[in-house]
Each structure stands twice: as C-alpha cells, then as structure tokens.
Amino acid sequence: MFDPSKYRTFRFTERSLSADGVVRLGYALDDEHEFVEELEVPVPEGADLARVEPILDLLHWVAGVSYYKTAAPPEVAFEGAVPGPAAADFLEALYSEGLGEFAVVNHLPALPRPKFPREGLVREAPARSLSRVLVPIGGGKDSIVALEIVRRSGLDFTLFSVRDNPAMQRTAAVAGVEHVVAQRRLPLELLGELNRSGALNGHVPITAIVSCVALLTAALNGYDAVTLANERSASSGNVVYDGIEVNHQFSKSARAEALLRGAVAETGAPVDIFSLLRPASELGIARTFAGMPAYHGAFTSCNAIFRLDPALRASSWCGNCPKCRFVFLILAPYMEPSALEAIFHKPMLDLEDQYEGFALLTATGGHKPFECVGEEEESAAAILLLADDERWKDHTVVARLVREVLPTRHPDVAAVLRLSDAHNVPDELIEHVHALLGA
Ligand SMILES: CC(=O)N[C@H]1[C@@H](OP(=O)(O)OP(=O)(O)OC[C@H]2O[C@@H](n3ccc(=O)[nH]c3=O)[C@H](O)[C@@H]2O)O[C@H](CO)[C@@H](O)[C@@H]1O[C@H](C)C(=O)N[C@@H](C)C(=O)N[C@@H](CCC(=O)O)C(=O)O
Ligand SMILES: Nc1ncnc2c1ncn2[C@@H]1O[C@H](COP(=O)(O)OP(=O)(O)OP(=O)(O)O)[C@@H](O)[C@H]1O
C-alpha cells in the first residue's frame, strides 16, 4: 500500500536536454519512488543549449507538480540549481493554490504549502524586442481568436502545441500557418500503479506546464514571445477552502501570469510571455469567435480531447460536460440554433436533462464546476441575452433558466463585455486586441 502521509521530501533530481530536443525531467519521493518525464521539443541545428538552461530548470520545477501530488509531502529538495526569489514565489503558489482543487477533492485538511529555496541566480532581464512570436493553440476558440489577433498585427508567428490532436490540426489547417508540436510522455503506468495502491491524484495546474514547454521551445528557436489566450474570466475561482479561493484554472489566472513573468525575467532569457485575451471575458471572446465561421468546423473546446490514454480520448465534443455546456451557452446569443447544432450534434439548450448542468454554471444548485468555465456572471449574462432572443427563448432549457435562475441574478451584460485595462499585452498588439474584441 502507498501511504501518502509517510513521505517527507519531494526531490528534484536531474534534468537534461539533448541536441535533438529530448528533455528528461527526473524526480523522487524520498528514496523510494523515482519519476521520469520525457518531452521532445523542436530544436534547430546547432542551437545553443547552454543558453536555455535557466528555462529548462523552470520547466523542471513546474512539471514536478504531477509527481509531487502523489503524496504532497511537506518538503522539497534540489539536487541541481535552486530557484531564485521570483521563481520561488511562483512555485510556492503553484504547489499550493495550483493544487487547491486537488486538496478539496482529496479532503486534505489544508492546501499543501512546501517552502522553496530562493537563493538561485538572478540574471539580468534582457532588452526585449517583438518581431517573432509563438502562439500556443489548444484546439479551442480562445487560441483561435489569439492567433487572429497576432495575424492582424503583422508579426511573424508560428503555432505551437504540446501533443497534437485533431482539433489542433484542423485549426492550423484553417489558419494556414506553420504548426510545431512538442511531445510529452508522462510515466503513466507508474502513476496509475501508485494511484491504485493509494497515491493521491487530482487536478494539476496544466497551463503552467504547457507555458514552460512553449517558453523552452521559443528560447531554443529564437522567438521573442509566447502569446497565450488566457481570458480575464480565468481569474475567478470556484470555492473557498483553507482561506483560499480555489480556482480550477489557477495557472490561467492573472495572478499566475504575473508570477510566471517574474520567474521568466529572472532567467535572463530574451523571451516574454503574456496573455493576449486577458482584457476579455469568455462571453466577449465567444462574440468575436462567432464571427469566424471558417473555424467553426475545426475547433473543439471539450477537455475530453486532451485525455492521455487514446482509448479514453474523444476526438471532438462529448456534448455532456460543463465545458460543452458553457461554450454552447456563450455562443448561443451570437449564433443560429442550427449552426450550433451542426457543431455539437445536439440541441443542448433544448434537452431537459441538461438543465441542472446549465444552471450550475451560474452556481445555482451548487458551486461553479471545477472545469474551464467562465464567471457565473457571464453565464447569467448569456441567459439574459437569450431571454429576449426569438431564436432561442422557447428552447426548453432557456425558458426554464429564465424562469428559475434569472430572477435571482442581475447580470450587467455591458460590463461583462467591456475590455479591461489590466493586462500585460505590449503596445504592438493591444490595438489589435481592441480591434477584434471591442464592441
Ligand atoms: C483531459 C482532462 O481533463 N484530464 C483531467 C482528468 O484526468 P484523466 O485521468 O481523466 O485523464 P488524463 O488527463 O489523461 O490524465 C491521466 C493521468 O495523468 C495525470 N496527469 C495528467 C497530466 C499532467 O500534466 N499531469 C498528470 O499527473 C492525471 O492526474 C491522471 O491521473 O482529471 C485529472 C484529475 O482531476 C486532471 O488533472 C486532468 O486534467 C489534465 C491535467 C488536463 O490536461 N486538463 C486540462 C484540459 C484543463 O483542465 N485545463 C484547464 C486549465 C487549468 C489550469 O490551471 O491550467 C483549462 O483549460 O481551463
Ligand atoms: N496542449 C496544448 N498545447 C499548446 N497550448 C495549449 C495546450 N492546451 C492549452 N493550451 C493553451 O493554453 C491556454 C489556455 O487554454 P484554453 O483551453 O483555455 O484555450 P483554448 O483551447 O484555445 O480555448 P477553449 O477555452 O475554447 O478551450 C491557451 O493559450 C491555449 O492555447
């Protein structure tokens, strides 16, 4: 049996990057269990591997969260480089708040709170320019809107994914832009075996891992920045636990972005990272995306497409999860019922058995689901828009949401759609964010 409470220390053992782009990340739980994760990142001939070592370290520390979570021990130890102060701040947030949902579902008495050393080298932040950018795409609508913003700016850009799936491939084909892919191999057999014998399991702050793989790829291949598509709504949490607002999307939040940017600056790498969609809500992004029909047959926002086991992975919308419901709901005010049915293959807002799931998006009947769904206010705003929409108002679920949910909600649609000034988008791009996402 695996008894999580008996472990004291999670160790960062070794990491390496070979000239052909193979990354090995090593970890151990006390002296008992060793974990090795492998990645393959695109790397040009003759790349200066030594120059990217600090970003490789950051990736090593961040990706460790998948293995730390098996026991969530009180201490961490380092056999190689140690984090500097900004990286330590980021990691302490990631290994506690980033594991908030994990703590809730495992009924831990408190969030894990390992202390990270902070004596690592702080390199001088380089002068940055912005001419070539790497645009991560996850197969969903947000990264499509982000790539179209970058396209309009005239910057040179390449699409990037960690692992490939059909939605990403379709997106890249419609965009007609080069798409590079990094592969990622977790020791799934070992994790599964440990989980079956009692190891802890739960959600990890995956966007932080994807961001660091993108940063490493960018640094190796001479890109100036990684442009994420994390929206303003991703900063809102789900429940309060142990004095913290636990957020399923923690590593997409504005707070995580600020901490990551600090950690990246400390590496001295000439690569920036920021979220292009930070000023916008999901409802605002959906309004823009509705006007991009070329992508409607390509994208999939359902998370079932990300399952690592091919036997469990969906190729498109599952049509019965919080993410499918949320995306259907926020697109509905801006699309025809027939167009949405063509995407989801079912009239989700006309199916009575979907009512509870839709109501939950406004935290009616429980808390907002632990999924990548927007703020309760914006789901309520979408319902308010549908209430007066001849195309939608008589759909069974819409009519019931209007009757049973709206009387207790007072969404301000204009406020939900307004762009915020709180973002890290540079001058070269912000006017294009406003042009595409502004009213
Ligand atoms: C696809 C999915 O939603 N997976 C979540 C699910 O895991 P499941 O067991 O159903 O499938 P797998 O993802 O294939 O995982 C297999 C095992 O591997 C572990 N694992 C996976 C990836 C990783 O980086 N580290 C790992 O240790 C995993 O724990 C399984 O044991 O349930 C899990 C437990 O709640 C979730 O952690 C899985 O979530 C994935 C990491 C994932 O990719 N999720 C994204 C779709 C997601 O949630 N994105 C959020 C961003 C959240 C953030 O803060 O970054 C979003 O889009 O908003
Ligand atoms: N496997 C991946 N490879 C590259 N980038 C990814 C991957 N998964 C997520 N991302 C990126 O992480 C950020 C957050 O992902 P998110 O799922 O919100 O975006 P999305 O897939 O574009 O849109 P949607 O909300 O419709 O699913 C985006 O910038 C997205 O491109």
Image (cartoon, rainbow, N blue to C red):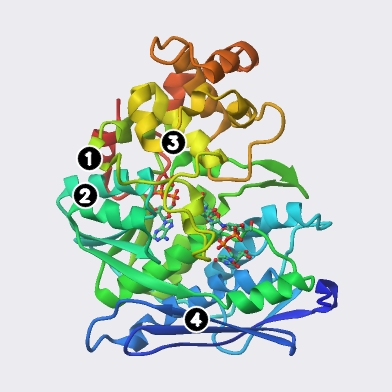
Asked if labels 1 and 2 touch by Cβ distance under 8 angstroms, the answer is yes
On whether ligand 2 comes within 8 Å of the CB at mark 3, the answer is: yes
Question: Which label was assigned to residue 121?
Answer: 4
Q: Residues within 10 Å of mark 2 (few under 14, many from 20)?
A: some
* Quarter of the image with the N terminus in it: bottom right
* Quarter of the image with the C terminus in it: top left
First in sequence, mark 4 or 1: give its number.
4
Question: Which label was assigned to residue 38?
Answer: none
Can residue 222 be seen here? The reply is yes
Q: Residues within 10 Å of mark 1 (few under 14, many from 20)?
A: few
Between marks 4 and 3, how big is the CA–CA gap? 39 Å
Left of 343 or right of it: where is 358? right
SS at mark 1? helix
Between marks 3 and 1, how big is the CA–CA gap? 20 Å
Find disc 1 in the rendering and name its residue.
294
Which tag is nearer the camera, tag 3 or tag 2? 2
Can residue 71 be seen here? The reply is no
